[in-house]
Amino acid sequence: MDCCNHIDPNKSEMKHDQSAGGYYTCPMHPEIKRDKPGMCPECGMALVPVKGKKMKSGHDHSGHTSGNQADFDKHAGHKTTSFLTKFWIALILTIPIFLYSDMAAMVGISAPQFSSSIYLQLILGSIIYFYCGWIFLASAYRELRARLPGMMTLIALAVTSAYIFSVWTVIRGTNNNLFWELSSLIAIMLLGHWIEMKSVQGAQGALKELAKLLPDKAEVIRGNHTEVISLNDLKVGDIVLVKPGSKVPADGKIIEGKSDLNESIITGESKPVSKGQGDEVIAGSINGDGSLKVEIVKIGEATFLAGVMRLVADAQASKSRLQMLSDRAALWLTVIAIIAGGTTFGTWLFVGAGIVIAVERLVAVLVITCPHALGLAIPLVASISTTKAAQNGLLIRNRLALESARTIDTILFDKTGTLTEAKFKVTKSSSDEALALAASVNTHSEHPIAKAIVEEARSRGIQFQSVNNFQRVPGKGAEGDIEGRYIFVGTKGGDDIVVERDGQVIGTISVADAVRPESKDAIAHLKESGIKVAMITGDSEETAKRVASELGLDEYFARVLPEDKVKKVRDLQSRGRKVAMVGDGVNDAPALTQADLGIAIGAGTNVAIESAGIILVRNDPRDIVKIINLSRLTYRKMIQNLFWATGYNVIALPLAAGVLAYKGIILQPALAAAFMSVSTVIVAFNAVLLKRAKL
């Protein structure tokens, strides 16, 4: 499936970077190009910046698309097999090199000797070094050019040291070279890297999995017939036929038909959602048994799915504090490896072990301390957790937000639309006159209570009057002029809505907002986790107390004006609390920003979403529990991987240097390469286990 052309999840960011010049690429896979930092989808290595060149949009010379959509390009991964091919070539050429090596003689193997046999090792070793090992040399050059020496730099130093020394011994006419160590080292590293890439590709792929949600084609209704077209040719306003069992090609609105749609992969909702005429449908959702005619309202990067993909890409590119620590540690490990390698080389020369053993120990130290496992430990877990979050209806806007979720000890809910359904209903009105005036003023308001009043008046057949000078009164209600007289509709400290005319109360209206059934379950689980739950609302004390009592909240704040919500967050923080704010409205944005963690309800306003670190696709407070659980699981996996990666190097480096050589324990370069690859695979495997964890 080639869905890259109709969704560009990072188009705006790409434009910015292109104007500035430069892009990010993988040292080992230069065909991978990104407009922002991150990890290579092929091998998991950290991308390095390339300055002074502009990244072209569309497909580059390698067939990959630029930007993050290359993660799911149908051509991605074709380079992986070349590592396996070069491994077989290196392995085959290593056999004759071994037969003429000192190692073979030590185990009693002797090959036919001839006058130029010493040059056979030189020729075959040179082929392995320059052809099979060139990928490591070129990758090291890219790391050094970006001033970010790392894994490839160490490997290049190791194989180059062995090769130069071996060539020098041939020139001298001696046979104590390291061609066998060089060839076996490159062969094992090629095989190890191929295994690593397969592991990483199995663990990666948030964008790839999301892209798979889209169909290849769309069936568009043209007059009295249908026409199958590519998604690239789909336009806003097109009417598409969505048959039973097929996927919705783009965001749209049902104009005919009724069916149950499965949106689980997009929203995390496992139960199919019943939808009919006038309802909106999301690209990638799977149709049930009914046939639908859908009018396309959004295509390409404007669709919900593309928005999800942008957020996932941004989250993968952003870094948590642990990843920043891991990056610094990987850089320092590179520096330590070079210093340790030099020290090891000098020490063995000093004790009179000879140049061969000294170079051999140098190579082993450089290889064993390659920081690939350490560099992969955090990004891979982050990538998997981002995928898992998206699959559960949790959109992570940045990694720091998810990381901070595990430290939250207080969650502050905005009442309306989060803990309650925000579907108000008029339960009582003192008179039709009061209801008529209130409804007339509120025809200009978008507030849920205002809509409930208008709906009740319409259901009773009440005539509306013309309103002048309408104005919303934040946190209180609305006002306007009817027939030259000032009308106010809102709350003034009581539980009912008052209707005033020229300052005189002429009636009251009572409304009710039902508590979400899932709110009780969510709050119970949060409290079981040791988290305090509070509520903030602009409603009266009586209403707030009733809801708080029904839900079993630890604390509530009533009669809070929009501009004062942020003050309540600060008050909680001043008590030493780590506060998460959950809201869905424009007036929640400052509080979402002030909180240690801002969580926006996905159905809320764009302002609230832009102010939050995590977005809930569904209006379900139980998903807050999933955020906390995912944050704790992710952190645990990161710590486990860091412990393994650093602990491995602490133990392996001294062994490679030869501290136990007096006991006959020697770590050969080829074995060091194998251990290095195994450590990386273990880190990747441990990260993959996060996929199976339940939230």
Image (cartoon, rainbow, N blue to C red):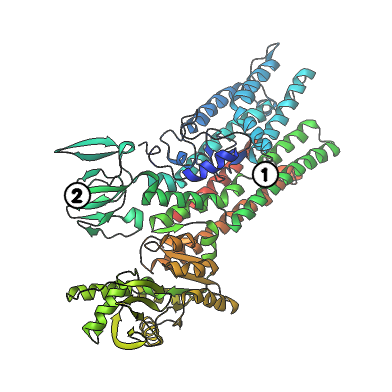
Q: Which quarter of the picture shows residue 669?
A: top right
Give the residue drawn at x 73%, y 34%: 360
Residue drawn at 19 percent across, 56 percent down: 277
Q: Quadrant of the C terminus?
A: bottom left
x and y, in percent, of residue 392 in the image: 38, 58
682 displayed left or right of 52: left
Can residue 253 be seen at all in this image of the molecule? yes
The residue lying furthest to the front in this view is 484
Q: Nearer the viewer, mark 2 or mark 1?
A: 2
**Residue 215 position by quadrant:** top left
Identify which residue, 156 or 401, lies in the foreground. 401
Check disc 2 and report the residue beneath it.
292
- Among all residues in the image, which is located at the extreme left? 224
Q: Residues within 10 Å of mark 1 (few under 14, many from 20)?
A: many
Instruction: Note whether 579 is above or below 488 in the view shown.
Output: above
* Residue designated by label 1: 369
Q: Residue at x 73, y 22 (%)?
A: 167
Residue 576, position as x, y percentages in the image: 59, 77
Alpha carbon distance from label 2 to label 1: 59 Å
Question: Would residue 158 appear left or right of 508 to someone viewing this image?
Answer: right
* Residue 643 location, quadrant: bottom right
